[in-house]
Image (cartoon, rainbow, N blue to C red):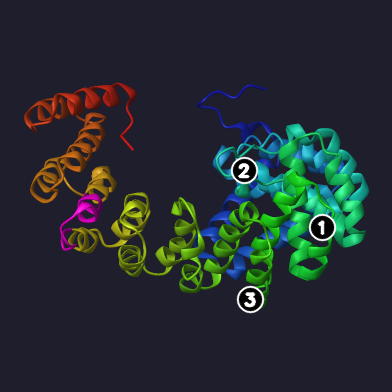
C-alpha cells in the first residue's frame, strides 16, 4: 500500500500505532535522558519480542519500516537482534535494507551468528560478502567488515591456521586483508612472540599487513620490546611499523608517542595527526601550543585547521586571539587563515573576516588564498554581494580567476 505525504500508515495497521509510539517514547527517554527507566522499558520490549516466532519478527520489522526513517534506527536493529538468534540469514537480508545503522546492524548479527555457528556464518559471508557492508574507500581502518568478525571467532574457537585459511579463501581483497589484519592483531595482543613466529612464514603482501597489525596491537606494557623488534626489520618494513606503533601509543600517552616522531623519515603529517587527535579531545589550547613548539613549520598548515576547528567550536574568541598573538611568520598567517576558513559558517560576519585577513595576514599568497576561501563560502548565500567584494578586495587577476572557478564548483580551496 502506498502512503501519501498526508496519510498516516499506522491508521491501516491495527496495533501498530501503540508499537510505534512505545518505541519512539522509549528511544527519547533512553537517548535523551539516558535514564535507567527508559533502558528498562526497552529491555522489557526485547523480552516480549523473544516470545515471537521468526515470521512474527519479520512482520514486525516490515511494520517498523513504515516509521519515519530517523525513528527506525533504534527499533529495527533491536528486532533484528532477536531474529538473529533464530534465523540470522533472514535478519541479515532485512538489515541490508536499512538506511540508518545498516553496517553496525549487520556486524551485530554476524557477531551473534559466529558465537552460535561460526562455520555457517563463515559460509554465508563468503557467498554474500560483496553485498553486505558499505565500502569505506576513504579510511580502510574504519571499514566495518564481517570478515574480521568471523576471522576473530574462528581464531577463538579453532586455530590460527584455520582462520588464515578461511581469510585467504575470500574473493574480495579488501575483506581478505581486513580478516588477516584482525587475526594478526588478535594473536599479537595475546602473544607477541607467537605473532613473530607466524610472521616468518608469510609472503610479502601478507607480511606487510602483519607487520602493521602487530605494531598496532602490541601490548602497551611492553612497548620497549616492540621497539626492539622494529629495529630488526628492514628499512621499508620499519616505515610500515613505526607509524602504527606511534598511533597506538598516542591513544594512551600522546607525549610518549611524540618522542618517536624523530625516527619517522619523510612526510610525518599523518603520524603527527594521530598524536595530536587525543590532545585535541582533551584540550584544544594545549594541542595548539604543542603543535607550534613540537612540529615543523611545514606541518603547521596541515594540522592547524583540525586543532583550531575544535577550539573554535568551544571558544572562538580565544582561538582567534591565540592565532593573532603568534610570532610573525608563515605559521601565524596560516593560523589566521585557518581560523577564517573555519568561521565562514557564521561565527563572524564575512566582512569582519575579510578585514581580519587584510589587517593580520602578512604573506600575500596566504592572504589571497584566505580571501578566496571566505568569498567562495559567502557566495553560496549572497552571491551578488560576494562578487562585488571579490572585485573590491584587491585580488590578483590569478586569484580572481580562481575565485570564479571555485564559485562555479561551489567548493572552497584547500
| Proximity of marks 2 and 3: CB atoms separated by less than 8 Å | no
Q: Is the residue marked by circle 3 packed among few (<14), some (14-19), or many (20+) residues within 10 Å?
A: few
Report the mark closest to the observer, 2 or 3. 3
List x then y, in percent, for residue 87.
87, 44
Q: Quadrant of residue 368?
A: top left
Residue occupying image coordinates x 71% and y 39%: 174
* Range shown magenta: 324-336
Q: Is 281 drawn above or below residue 62 in the view shown?
A: below
List x then y, in percent, for residue 241.
63, 58
Q: According to the image, label 1 marks what residue?
A: 200
Please, which residue is most extreme toward the bottom here?
Answer: 221
Q: According to the image, label 3 marks what residue?
A: 224
Q: Is the residue marked by circle 1 packed among few (<14), some (14-19), or many (20+) residues within 10 Å?
A: few
List x then y, in percent, for residue 214.
70, 61
Name the dominant secondary structure of the magenta segment. helix
Residue 258 makes an appearance in the image: yes
Q: Which residue is more in the foreground, 340 or 86?
A: 340
398 to the left or right of 394: right
158 to the left or right of 49: right
Mark found first going from the N terminus, 1 or 3:
1
Query: Which type of secondary structure does the marked residue at label 1 adopt?
Result: loop
Query: Which type of secondary structure does the marked residue at label 2 adopt?
Result: helix
Amino acid at each position: 500500500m502506498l502512503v501519501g505525504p498526508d496519510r498516516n500508515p499506522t491508521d491501516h495497521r491495527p496495533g501498530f500505532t501503540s508499537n510505534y509510539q512505545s518505541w519512539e517514547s522509549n528511544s527519547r527517554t533512553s537517548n535523551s535522558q539516558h535514564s535507567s527507566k527508559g533502558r528498562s522499558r526497552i529491555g522489557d520490549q526485547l523480552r516480549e519480542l523473544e516470545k515471537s516466532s521468526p515470521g512474527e519478527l519479520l512482520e514486525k520489522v516490515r511494520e517498523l519500516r513504515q516509521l519515519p526513517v530517523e525513528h527506525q534506527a533504534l527499533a529495527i536493529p533491536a528486532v533484528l537482534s532477536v531474529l538473529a538468534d533464530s534465523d540470522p540469514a533472514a535478519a541479515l537480508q532485512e538489515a541490508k535494507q536499512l538506511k540508518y545503522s545498516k553496517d553496525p546492524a549487520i556486524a551485530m548479527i554476524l557477531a551473534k551468528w559466529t558465537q552460535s555457528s561460526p562455520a555457517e556464518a563463515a559460509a554465508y559471508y563468503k557467498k554474500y560478502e560483496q553485498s553486505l557492508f558499505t565500502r569505506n574507500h576513504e579510511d580502510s581502518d574504519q571499514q566495518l567488515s564481517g570478515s574480521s568478525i568471523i576471522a576473530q571467532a574462528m581464531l577463538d574457537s579453532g586455530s590460527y591456521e584455520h582462520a588464515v585459511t578461511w581469510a585467504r579463501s575470500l574473493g574480495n581483497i579488501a575483506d581478505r586483508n581486513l580478516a588477516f589484519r584482525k587475526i594478526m592483531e588478535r594473536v599479537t595482543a595475546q602473544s607477541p612472540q607467537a605473532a613473530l613466529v607466524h610472521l616468518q612464514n608469510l609472503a610479502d603482501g601478507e607480511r606487510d599487513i602483519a607487520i602493521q597489525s602487530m605494531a598496532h596491537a602490541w601490548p602497551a606494557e611492553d612497548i620497549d620490546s616492540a621497539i626492539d623488534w622494529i629495529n630488526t626489520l628492514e628499512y621499508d618494513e620499519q616505515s610500515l611499523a613505526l607509524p602504527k606503533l606511534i598511533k597506538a601509543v598516542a591513544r594512551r600517552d600522546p607525549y610518549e608517542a611524540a618522542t618517536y616522531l624523530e625516527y619517522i623519515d619523510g612526510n610525518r603529517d599523518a603520524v603527527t595527526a594521530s598524536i595530536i587527535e587525543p590532545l585535541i579531545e582533551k584540550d584544544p589550547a594545549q594541542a595548539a601550543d604543542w603543535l607550534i613548539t613540537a612540529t615543523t613549520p611545514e606541518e603547521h598548515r596541515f594540522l592547524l585547521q583540525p586543532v583550531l576547528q575544535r577550539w573554535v567550536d568551544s571558544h572562538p574568541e580565544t582561538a582567534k586571539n591565540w592565532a593573532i598573538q603568534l610570532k610573525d611568520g608563515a605559521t601565524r598567517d596560516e593560523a589566521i587563515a585557518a581560523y577564517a576558513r573555519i568561521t565562514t559558517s557564521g561565527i563572524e560576519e564575512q566582512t569582519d573576516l575579510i578585514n581580519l585577513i587584510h589587517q593580520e595576514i602578512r604573506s600575500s599568497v596566504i592572504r589571497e588564498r584566505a580571501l578566496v576561501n571566505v568569498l567562495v563560502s559567502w557566495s553560496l548565500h549572497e552571491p551578488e554581494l560576494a562578487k562585488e567584494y571579490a572585485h573590491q578586495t584587491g585580488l590578483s587577476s590569478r586569484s580572481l580567476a580562481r575565485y570564479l572557478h571555485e564559485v562555479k564548483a561551489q567548493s572552497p580551496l584547500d
